């Protein structure tokens, strides 16, 4: 069976029913480790190989997963790998995703799908041609607070959306992950952080009509951006992304419809707060889970179930490409200082 | 005993008028000379409520006063200011200064010609948190300031605030100027370029109730202002003022009215915030009065009020043209 058509069930579907899905992980940074650990907790899933630079990082994660260390090329072409998780630096996504697709592997790619639109289009073409699934890790779609907001929008509880603000901040990643600081590799705070909310804005409200943005890139990874996303009639949406949130990661949103308003602030959302005499720098005394299953694991559980059923992923390559393109429009607007008319890629 | 300044209140049209009247009545350095209002019924009630003298004519109030606070509609501010200046009376104008740059300029000129001072009511500058932030910025604690995200969202005030002629616009006219003024003051810099997205989405008004401004400052920093009347009627307070300030060496969040008790009130079926922070109106008018008494410049003058107004006017022009607008284009 050819498996060329996107609506057809993939060739791998029949081989996966009832047997373990074998996963190879590319990258052992934050995303690679998160996805590997999330996969570990799922039934009928095995992490078989890990590739990363530097090698010792790969070895540690491989050991934790009971997997072997391999090169990225080996994983993309290995006989015992059904799906490749691409969690490398952003500028390398396209190379490995297309390599894996051509070898008949499903691809789960961390967001953003790629650094450039051309790279993303190449990935989509390669996966479509090979009849494999291409999924993009826009994990916010699996965060229950964002899902609840979407539900209250869709069922009319909030009325017609009028204005929304979405904020997302983190401390500067600094020199710990040097590639983040290279705009040509990462796309900076817009493609790394704001892209979550740009994807959420598209998910909640559909395709906007125009974009205006300002950003600055300071020294040492300090970066901050503001974007205004306008829909033909409504809503008006403001998105903030910050690598100057020195107190650590936080998210928030405010969503005003003509019948009410939702407010979320992650800093006020933890059911569990721990302190010790050692102070904030003291040792962690206990785990602080806030959900029975993390959004990252929910994301993989959903993706793997869809692959087994021969269904399309919730966020496929085309969808990942559209969110990337919106991020690139934000960057273009900030660089040129002009309003950019938005037309989503097909 | 130190001298008291004779201060009157012109018009009770503005939602801030009751607080202004109470403040004038309570300030130690003020002799509250009374109230005049074009709407005699409204004015008489207000005068009675605040134990103030009712003046049937504007000239009567001006004759009794060394300074007046003008709490009229935005549109009427110019004519009241010009009348006060003509009688040699100092003016503290509610915000925004006027509804057009031309009117604002005329007010400044009239006061200058008459040798009286023109002040503008921006109470956010009186917030101890905002003052502390300004000192930190001036002292270099935060390094170079790169960006400010300001919000001044509120409930829809009703009345003439939704009337295009009397208010000069909607949420942008009402709320942009507070944020614009405090940003200028915090970073000691001027706005040069404004882009805005506006919409009338919530209340079915002829004026906008939602707006996001994106602005550039001369020194290279940028700022955004959310001026929307986005607070639902069930919101526990009228609105608020927040600032998220990003500098090279630090990031600061200000929530000007954060000092509040949460009151869960079974008699109204709602929760309300009960503020306990400093009364900014008292501090603002007190500083204005002290400056007049000392013969020194008022803390926020008409030129500064005009700078803030220009940002709002530029926002309307940007929304019309769907392009960023240079502030200098408003002055030709």
Image: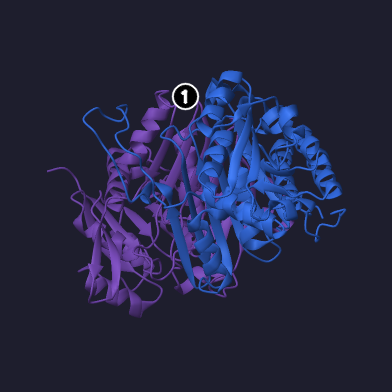
Chain colours: A blue, B purple
Q: Quadrant of residue B40?
A: bottom left
Q: Is residue A205 visible?
A: yes
Against A62, residue B257 (above or below) is: below
Query: Foreground residue, B310 or A328?
Result: A328
Identify the residue under disc 1.
B143
Query: Foreground residue, B275 or A123?
Result: A123
Kind of element beneath mark 1: loop
Q: Is residue A239 left or right of residue B151?
A: right
Against B226, residue A261 (above or below) is: below
Q: Which residue is depicted at the point 49% across and 43% down?
A: B304
Residue A280 x, y percent position in the rendering: 30, 30
Q: Which residue is depicted at the point 77% across and 33% down?
A: A77
Q: Is residue B125 left or right of residue A324?
A: left
Against A58, residue A310 (above or below) is: below
Q: Is residue A187 left or right of residue B245?
A: right
Report the residue that reaches farthest toward the left. B1
Residue A215 x, y percent position in the rendering: 62, 36
Query: Foreground residue, A283 or A308?
Result: A308
Query: Foreground residue, B269 or A58?
Result: A58
């Amino acid at each position: 069976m050819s498996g060329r058509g996107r609506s057809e069930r993939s060739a791998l579907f029949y081989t996966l029913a009832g047997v373990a899905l074998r996963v190879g992980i590319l990258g052992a940074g934050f995303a690679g480790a998160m996805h590997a650990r999330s996969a570990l907790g799922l039934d009928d899933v095995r992490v078989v190989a890990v590739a990363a630079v530097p090698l010792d990082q790969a070895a540690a994660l491989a050991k934790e997963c009971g997997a072997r260390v391999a090169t990225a090329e080996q994983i993309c072409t290995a006989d015992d790998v059904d799906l490749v998780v691409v969690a490398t630096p952003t500028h390398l996504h396209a190379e490995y995703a297309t390599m894996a697709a051509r070898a008949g592997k499903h691809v789960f790619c961390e967001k953003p799908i790629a650094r450039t639109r051309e790279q993303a289009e190449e990935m989509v073409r390669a996966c479509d041609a090979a009849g494999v699934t291409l999924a993009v890790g826009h994990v916010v779609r699996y965060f229950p607070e964002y899902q609840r907001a979407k539900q209250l929008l869709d069922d009319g509880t909030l009325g017609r959306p009028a204005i929304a603000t979405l904020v997302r901040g983190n401390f500067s990643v600094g020199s710990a992950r040097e590639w983040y600081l290279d705009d040509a590799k990462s796309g900076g705070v817009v493609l790394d952080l704001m892209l979550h909310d740009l994807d959420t804005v598209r998910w909640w409200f559909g395709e906007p009509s125009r974009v205006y943005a300002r950003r600055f890139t300071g020294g040492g990874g300090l970066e901050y951006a503001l974007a205004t996303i306008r829909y033909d009639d409504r809503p008006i949406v403001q998105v903030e992304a910050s690598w100057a949130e020195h107190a650590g990661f936080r998210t928030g949103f405010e969503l005003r419809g003509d019948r009410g308003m939702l407010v979320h602030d992650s800093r006020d959302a933890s059911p569990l707060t721990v302190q010790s005499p050692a102070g904030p720098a003291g040792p962690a005394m206990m785990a602080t889970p806030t959900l029975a299953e993390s959004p990252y694991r929910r994301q993989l559980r959903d993706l793997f179930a869809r692959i087994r059923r021969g269904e399309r992923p919730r966020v496929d390559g085309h969808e990942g490409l559209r969110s990337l393109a919106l991020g690139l429009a934000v960057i273009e607007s900030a660089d040129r200082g002009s309003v950019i008319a938005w037309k989503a890629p097909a | 005993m130190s001298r008291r300044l004779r201060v009157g209140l012109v018009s009770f049209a503005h939602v801030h008028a009751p607080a202004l009247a109470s403040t004038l009545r309570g300030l130690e350095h003020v002799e509250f000379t009374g109230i005049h209002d074009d709407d005699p019924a409204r004015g008489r009630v207000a005068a009675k409520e605040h134990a103030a003298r009712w003046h049937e004519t504007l000239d009567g109030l001006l004759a009794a006063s060394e300074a007046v606070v003008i709490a009229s509609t935005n549109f009427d501010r110019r004519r009241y200011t010009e009348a006060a200046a003509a009688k040699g009376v100092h003016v503290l104008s509610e915000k925004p200064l006027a509804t057009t740059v031309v009117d604002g300029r005329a007010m400044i000129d009239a006061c200058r010609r008459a040798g009286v001072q023109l002040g503008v009511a921006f109470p956010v500058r009186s917030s101890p948190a905002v003052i502390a932030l300004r000192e930190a910025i001036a002292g270099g604690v935060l390094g170079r300031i790169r960006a400010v995200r300001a919000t001044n969202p509120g409930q829809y005030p009703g009345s003439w605030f939704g009337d295009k002629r009397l208010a000069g616009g909607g949420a942008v006219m009402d709320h942009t100027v507070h944020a614009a003024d405090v940003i200028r003051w915090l970073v000691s810099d001027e706005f040069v370029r404004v882009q805005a997205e506006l919409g009338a989405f919530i209340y079915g008004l002829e004026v906008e109730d939602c707006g996001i401004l994106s602005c550039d400052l001369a020194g290279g920093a940028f700022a955004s202002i959310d001026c929307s009347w986005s607070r639902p009627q069930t919101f526990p307070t009228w609105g608020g003022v927040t600032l998220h300030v990003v500098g090279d060496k630090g990031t600061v969040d200000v929530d000007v009215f954060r000092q509040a008790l949460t009151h869960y009130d079974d008699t109204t079926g709602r929760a309300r915030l009960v503020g306990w922070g400093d009364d900014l109106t008292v501090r603002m008018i007190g500083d204005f009065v002290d400056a007049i008494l000392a013969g020194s410049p008022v803390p926020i003058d008409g030129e500064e009020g005009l700078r803030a107004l220009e940002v709002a006017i530029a926002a309307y022009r940007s929304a019309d043209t769907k392009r960023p607008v240079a502030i200098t284009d408003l002055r030709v």
